[in-house]
Amino acid sequence: MTQLILEQALNGLQFGLMLFLLAAGLTLVFGIMDCINLAHGSLYMVGAYFVAAAAQAADSFWIGLAVGVAGAALLGLLLELSLFRRLYRRDHLSQVLATFALILIANETVRMIWGAQPVMLNAPEALAGPLEIAGFSYPAYRLVIIAFGLAVAGLLYLLVARSRVGMWVRAGAANREMTEALGIDVQRLFTAVFVFGAALCALAGGLLGPLLAVQVGMGESVLILAFVVIIIGGIGSVRGALVGSLIVGTADTLGRALLPTLLRATLPADAAATLGPALASILIYLLMAAILFFRPQGLFPARA
Amino acid sequence: MAFYQPARYQKPVAGALLLALIALPPALTALGQEFYIGFATRLLIFALAASSLNLVLGFGGMFSLGHAAFFGAGAYAAAICMRAGISEALLVLPLAMLVAGALALLVGAISLRTRGVYFIMITLAFAQMAYYLFVSARAWGGDDGLPLPGRMTLAGLSLGSDSALFYAALGCLALAVVFLGSLAGARFGRTIQAIRENETRMEALGYPVFRYRLVCFVLGGALAGLAGALLANLTGLASPNLLQWTQSGTLLVMVIIGGVGYLYGGVVGAVVLLSLEEVLSGFTLHWPIGLGLLLLGIVLLAPRGVAALFGKTGG
């Protein structure tokens, strides 16, 4: 049981950190530019395909990851310059419509190029096996993902909390007009943030590729989770996104692993068999509704 | 956004359209194109669903991203009812509306305490909960959905033929549009539009803003449930896919294309979107790309929707 809980807790941490990579970009785009980007999940999907294709061409996972992330950043730049720039000042309805259209285009383009079947992306061979630490074994690749996630989270913290650009970003999230009035080129800042968010999406997509299937539609389910994360954490707050990701990641993973067992211990078997999976899959939404009810601005509101 | 005011030519155009629609099934049968009767029924049903969202979004100013939950709840309510042996439409449809309305009451009572983006997200969260509940409910078919034993009967008459169901859907849509039209002009409609324009002011004038919004939200949910029950009858299946968030997104897109806050916005949007899908899918397998580009064009070129190009807005 301890082995199971520890393993699931690590899985939850790993899932949470990957969610953070997605949520960090989303919360900044949402918080600073007040732009609902439903196509954020599509960037994740396209990024994963880029990584898979590049890894296959170069026959190396790491080169593929680097090339794929760079490709997604470039795509993000093109999207920002051609489309998103026009959307920031429009109302939320227009943003929903436009980014919904982007989802349609992205899914179908990917299906056209790579086909409807999932694409294989293999983890580097050196990391394929499990790693044994003091009688406890855990897949090495998942540990690498955790390390990656922690490193990016730390880097992002330094960037946002300690650097000048990060200060501008935080200022933009707290009060956009004031930041503009102080002479910050918000337009260029927006572009940079958007491109950075796209790169993080592709990084998450590429790292998760060997664990999940790289397939059309993978972006939509994860997009909703990322939205849940940034609502829980507070829109525009990177710290909130980190805390929210870890909460959602562990709650979801532990809930799926442990709730059915717990319910079996307390309820009749057939009721537990129905209720367990249902409760596990709605757990994070219950959590989000509860947090919104008691703290409508999220845990770490960026706007004062 | 201004208060809703019908255009002068709106009534005669709607009347002519209704007559044309009544003549449609015999005409299609005569032409040997019976397939399109089912398609036209689908258009009518989605027009009803989009109109119900337009009541919430356009008139009530509530940006709900969870409307599919009520749509799907209506479909499941109808399926469960009919499997229990009740197939009279005069019972099934009100029951479906009741179930969807009750769900909307629950969701609205909690969600309407939040504002702006948070409202969008909390409605989405509730819709996702409903989706996962239906997916994991094995008694109701889980992933596969719940097949219907047959079609409803209306006052003893069978709706088994596609034409009969078409007329039933047309009747529901026409009644709903008349209802929404008179609602928009009535005291209640004026009040919710005023709340959309300036909530603080209405609050200060002593209007129970929360209650008005909640009633509007519940009415929209109930109408969506009606559409869901009809759709389940058309396809013979209540599927959890009806509750997926992409379905909410599709309904939103219909309303936005058609024109938010215009009486016929939902109808126009549903017809435009579904017809575009049908036409484009005849040309190419990759029609979503074309559809996506068209939607982008609409956002950038006709920001207030297609119906806004024709409708009149009053002072």
Image (spheres, rainbow, N blue to C red):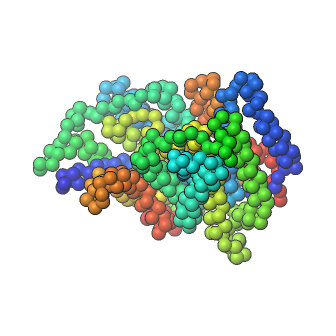
x and y, in percent, of residue A124 in the image: 26, 33
Nearest the viewer among B100 and A98 is: B100
Residue pictured at 55% horizontal, 59% vertical: B103
Residue farthest toward the front in the current orientation of the protein: B156
x and y, in percent, of residue B86 in the image: 57, 49
x and y, in percent, of residue B298 in the image: 68, 40
Quarter of the image for the C terminus of chain B: give it.
bottom right
Q: Is residue A61 shown to the viewer in this render?
A: yes
Whether residue A240 is situated above or below residue A277 in the rendered picture: below
Indicate the quadrant where residue A99 lies: top right
Residue pictured at 75% horizontal, 47% vertical: B174
Nearest the viewer among A124 and A67 is: A124
Residue pictured at 48% horizontal, 53% vertical: B130
Quarter of the image for the N terminus of chain B: give it.
bottom right
Give the total number of marks visible in the rendering.
0
Nearest the viewer among A62 and B197 is: B197
Left of B304 or right of it: where is A146?
A: left
Q: Is residue B266 shown to the viewer in this render?
A: no
